Amino acid sequence: MATAPFLASFYFACGVIIFFLAVTILRHSGRDVVNWSTALVLFFAGFGPILGAMGVFLEQNIREGTYLFKSLVGSFDYIWEFFFPALLLLALVHPVRHGLWRYIRNWSFLLFIPHLFHLVFIIFIIDQVNLDNLLRDIAGVNTSSGFLTSFLQSTSGLLDVFLGMLFRAHTKFFSFVNIAYAGFSMLLLGRALKMELSPRIKRQLRIVIGGLGLCIVTYSLAMVVPIFMGQELPENRANVLINAALIIGGGSIAFAIVRHQFLDMKLIARRGIIYAAAAAVFASIYLLIIRKVTGFFYQYSGTQVQVLETGFIILFIIAFQPMLGRLEEWAERVLTHENRSPRLRMRDLLNGLLSMVDVESIRERVKEEMGDVFSVGRVELVLDDDIRTSKEHVKDCDEVLKVLYQIDEPISRRDFLQSMGYKTGRGGLVPFRGGGSRMEKIDSATPCVKWFSGYNLIAPIIHDEACIGVLLIGDQSQNRRYSSEELSLIDMLTTQISATLAKIDLLKEVVEKKVLEEELNIARAIQLNLLPSAPPVLEEYEISALSISSKQVGGDYYDFIHRDDHVAVAVADVSGKGVPASLLMASLQASLRSNMDRMEDPVGVVSTLNNVMCESTAPDKFATLFYGCLDMKHDSFHFSNAGHVFPALIRDGGKIDILDYSGLILGVQPDFGYEARELKFHPGDTLVVLTDGVTEAETADGELFGEDRLYDMLKSLRGQSAFGVKEDIVQTIKDFTHPKGFSDDLTILILKRKE
Amino acid sequence: MKLQPKEHDGIVTLHLQGKLMGGPDADVFRGTIYDLIEQGKKKIIVDLRSVNWVNSTGIGILTSAFTTLRKNGGDLKLIHVSEKIQSILYVTKLNLIFECFDSEEEAITSFE
């Protein structure tokens, strides 16, 4: 058996690698069902060869040693058979969750039941055999009870024969169960392969399916074929085949993962070294210090201090994780040539993106850093808007983005072209498209495909169930391969870009809202500036005015202009709100003020304003205007009205005169013939000019304040100062509309002759 | 607001409802008028039977529709105008501009 040590080492090496990969996956991200089922498969696939190696080793060296130990290893030998149910579990969840998974997700342990039963059964038999031997030994030693001995011997003999038969039948036929599990798994994976879109996962699946096929064949050769042939293989030969099957099966999955999945061989190796180093450090601390310390204690106290050892182990467990992290960082710094590893630089880039608020700086930063980190010359960040604005590319880009959304991970140029329906040639060259006799050169590809395939790696940026852009990395001619770690970093980067873009969009919205608010504030400022700051102080008359806007910017306006013995008053209601209304108001005010050389001629003023409004404003802009001019020498008031709510004059005796003349509202018909009216102010007479915000003030139930209430209120205000009248009106309206508040703008102008 | 446009010999009657006081209803009305002008339908009757109140904004909307139609060679007439609204039209002197009728038939014949 010269091959035995070699075989044992081979088993051991393969087993440890596969086993180790399982542990790493579990440590890396063990929560996901795909990950832990993969880990489980690899764990059992690795377990078999390790035990196999131990078996060979034991056979070689402890041939005459303890029978018990060997049989114990033998019984654990069957644990590897859990490889098959674990495989089925993996096939159910990868690459997509199978429909069945919904029903069994909480019952997935049921898949393991036959094997669990199998294991228990085997251990039971082996233990029986051991017990049997033990009894025989006892019987041999102790001859005092002849009856017991003979009974035991005969019983154990019978049991031996019976269980032995059952054992053989079971072990032989259980292999069919295993093959059924493996076959079903292959079927599921085969179906998934057909439906899978991503070329990477397709390749991964092909490797796994191929490996599993070979695994089943090898396993059958060991277990099933001999049954049909009617003869048994020698045990060691069967063991070789079984271990080969496990190494092929587990190895193919491991290879597929390392080659085409999320883990990087370099990363695993680096981690391996670090874990080993950490373990060695801890072991040496244990051996060098703890043992000595306990020995020291033992010397003096005469008792073993187990607490110290336990304490150390607990400390070790607690310190293990953070220490490993530190060690890893330290190793990275020491081992890599660059000052900072791509991972750390990428982390900085991701953090940097978080604080960015415009697309251009993201583009620049990504270009710069990516070029540096991955040493590629060309990097391009293409976003939805870029595609939309570039005329030549827009046509087929939607189609391309849809496919990239399906793929949802960075892919190589070759895979990209394949996904777009191009045949791939050797060495990543892609000369033709289509099948059969019709061949198409890549030069004739649609612009977007051509554009993207100019790069080595195409990473889609996904947001809200759509591909909103792509990150194109590296010139096509470079033909550089990206490691799994690099790919996962790029994947993280595109996710971050997507999140940052979403944030920028939100920010834009907020800013736009702010701008709008600011605009309204400007309009409000214009409006407030248009209103006169304080009424003129007159000898015999009082003026008080107020304008309240229901919203930020209203459409009401009032003015008074005092010149010598004359005071002109105007109240207007401009249609519309916001900035356009305030601009209209500004032009109205300018026109009004520029016409004050003839302030005593109301018809002239109103007609001019009407013509200005008709000529210079949009067809849907109107204004109502009440304009009047008071001659304080003669106490006469000339006024005209362009569609404004009729003002009221409260006579000193309490009688109310309605100034019921009105012409057409301003801005409808040029050269409308307005008329003027005249009234005399007696001491105590009060003129009240309002806008329709007063009569249309509304309660929560929709009841209007109305004219009747207005006139009743005005009557009660007799004798008050102009300021008092104004305040009372406002208060009354406030009370009336409480708790709803004003719904329209409210403007009041009071002109009173002192008593 | 539902406008329920009815067409009769190229004359469209719009049936307004509720309060004509600006807001989204005003936009619907304005939009409908512009649509009709685009379709070449410039003779429009507005039925105010179900409109109980009009404020200055509402008046603006009607007037704007009127001036827009006039500029495009069309006309706008009102029917079933309530007293309240008539008083507003009187104050604003829009009664001089808007022709008001008691029935749709009268309004239609006035177009001829």
Image (cartoon, coloured by chain):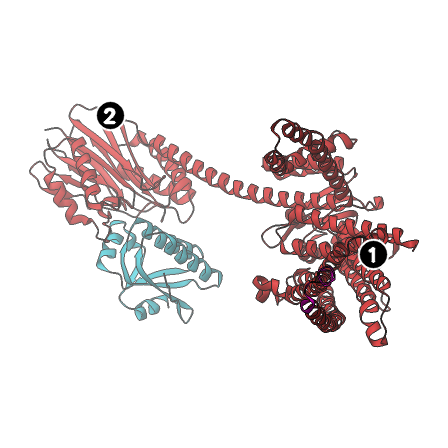
Residue pointed to by mark 2: A536
Chain represented in red: A
Residue at 64 percent of width and 37 percent of height:
A320
SS for callout 2: loop
Q: Are marks 1 and 2 in contact (CB under 8 Å)?
A: no
| Chain where mark 1 sits | A
Residue span colored magenta: A136-148
Which three-letter amino acid code belongs to the residue tagged 1?
A: Ile
Between residue B8 and residue A386, name the one nearer to us.
A386
- In the displayed structure, A38 sits above or below A230; it is above
Between residue A650 and residue A111, name the one nearer to us.
A111
Question: Is residue A279 covered in magenta?
Answer: no
Q: Residue A471, located in which quarter of the rendered image?
A: top right
Colour for chain B in the figure: cyan
- In the displayed structure, A293 sits above or below A654; it is above
Badge 1 and badge 2 in a common chain: yes
Q: Is residue A443 left or right of residue A342?
A: right
Query: Split into 4 quadrants, where in the image is the N terminus of chain A?
Result: bottom right
Residue pointed to by mark 1: A442
Label 1 neighbour load within 10 Å: few <14, some 14-19, many 20+: some
Which three-letter amino acid code belongs to the residue tagged 2?
A: Pro
Which residue lies most toward the left here? A653
Label 2 neighbour load within 10 Å: few <14, some 14-19, many 20+: some
Which residue lies most toward the front here? A144
Residue at 85 percent of width and 67 percent of height:
A438
Overall secondary structure of the magenta section: helix
Q: Is residue A701 left or right of residue A579?
A: left
